[in-house]
Image (cartoon, coloured by chain):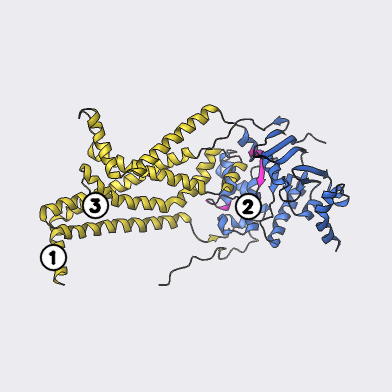
Chain colours: A yellow, B blue
Amino acid sequence: MNNFVKLGQDIAETWAKNGSTYLNGALQTLLLALVGTAAGCLIGFICGILQTIPTSERDHFVKKAILAVVRFIIRIYVEVFRGTPMILQAVFVYFALPYFTNNAIRLDLILASYLVVSINTGAYMAETVRGGILSIDVGQTEGAKAIGMNHFQTMLYVIIPQMTRNILPQIANNLIINIKDTSVMFIIGFTELFAVHKSVSGALYVYFPSAVITMAIYLVMTVASSVLLRFFESRLDGPENFDISTTDSLAHTSGMFNYIEKKRRRPE
Amino acid sequence: MSEPILQISHLSKTFGTHEVLKDIDFSVSKGDVTTIIGASGSGKSTLLRCINLLETPTSGEILYHGNNIVGIKGGESKYRSNVGMVFQSFNLFNNMTVLKNCMIGQQIILGKSKEEAKDESLFYLEKVGMAPYVKARPKQLSGGQKQRVAIARALAMHPEVLLFDEPTSALDPETVGEVLEVMKQLANDGMTMIVVTHEMAFARDVSNRVVFMSNGVICEDGTPEEIFGSPKLQVTRDFLSRFLETQKQ
């Protein structure tokens, strides 16, 4: 029991001395994760959409050749950045330029970190988006084609909105993974939450109390992201019920209509 | 007879080595209500999907106002906007409300303003009895309601020809009626329609031409009286026998 009291005291002491340092580290982590996930999503959307452009045998061979090359490049990108640890990617990106240019050119530390997280997330998102597009029922595409939409319009108005909704849980996954995994950026000296933990615990010899503080901050950030994204998902789904339009005098206009079973609520 | 809107000649379609359509000749004029009947797997849906270029014919021609549209690059979407299609599985856009489903095509294909598109959509939704449901999303509707919205969506594009691919096959017996009623109305209004269906009563009573298909070929082609009254071929008689028997009782 005494040890718990001691831990409490240590935590309070560590926090009192370094609270703002921790918070700044957390802010850097959060920014890196958010920007990296957003940029990764953008890369993923572009790659996923490029990969699913349909070709038919009647297409011009130039179009077919270009698409084949694009697909091949994306495939290599995905395999390399999904198949190697992010910690090594950071080292690779950060030290490659100085190596080849005899230290003449060096990427900015922060830029390199943002770049690596974005590219790494993009590799995963490319596959997520591709899967999301493939999962949309072919009937949606046929319905769109049947009223005269071309591939671009079909994607823009019909497929991408539905696909985006469906892959939101996976985007949330990536955000949460990034909040935690950006900790590897300490390897090239980016000062985020884990780096703060390392420096504080090293300076004050408070390894365990500092670890507790750091874990708690990580957990708060991930749970908050999770809750926010769930809320966003349910907002996207729109209302469960709909109003019967009052413009029609023949319709029963009072009340709400609902054909689907009410979502089961967990007993409180 | 006026110049045909659609003229199909020597149309064939093979999937791998399986020949689904063999040398189909067939034409549609303005105001025709053609039903295509036949057993499952006889190629009737494939024929309809070829007409809308959702399947690319292996060989043959489809003339639309005298111009071949098979294998012509770039014109597909434009052509499809003139030929409406109603699917067995409705294929309403799940991410849009009923109203938006009807408006989207007019806005982005026909270039109409939002107000115009809305008025037009409401007019056709009213026609199919779905005007009160403009704010609903497809998943909140029953099958029959979805199909009526799908018909309104197709009509709002002012198609010259409307294709129906087994529009009632996914519906329960009760809701089949509401959809058939709408289709009957359209036929009476002079809409040019090609209907693939298993609803023999609709074929007999509403259409002015019945095409019987079997094994990828058109076996018989005639007025409902000819096909239902005095079918020439044994296959046709066999296919219709059950329907005709239930009618006698």
The answer to whether residue B165 of the structure is visible from this angle is: yes
Q: Which residue ends up furthest to the left in the rendered image?
A: A204
- Residues behind callouts 1 and 3 on a single chain: yes
- Residue B25 falls inside the magenta stretch: no
Query: Left of A123 or right of it: where is B207?
Result: right
Say which residue label 3 marks: A26
**Residue drawn at x 43%, y 69% as measured from the top left:** A266
Give the camera-side residue of A242 and A204: A204
Q: What amino acid does circle 3 point to? A: Ala
Say which residue label 2 marks: B89
Q: What amino acid does circle 1 point to? A: Gln
User: Circle 3 marks a residue in which chain?
Assistant: A
Query: Left of A165 or right of it: where is A214?
Result: left
Dots 1 and 2: beta carbons under 8 Å?
Answer: no
Q: CA distance from mark 1 to mark 3?
A: 22 Å
* Picture layout, residue A66 above or below residue B81: above
- Residue B94 falls inside the magenta stretch: yes
Asked which secondary structure carries label 3, the reply is: helix
Number of dots carrying numbers: 3
Asked which secondary structure carries label 2, the reply is: loop
* Picture layout, residue B245 above or below residue A35: below
Dots 1 and 3: beta carbons under 8 Å?
Answer: no
Give the camera-side residue of A156 and A88: A88
Residue B185: % across, % down: 74, 52
Give the camera-side residue of A171 and B44: B44
First of labels 1, 3 by sequence position: 1
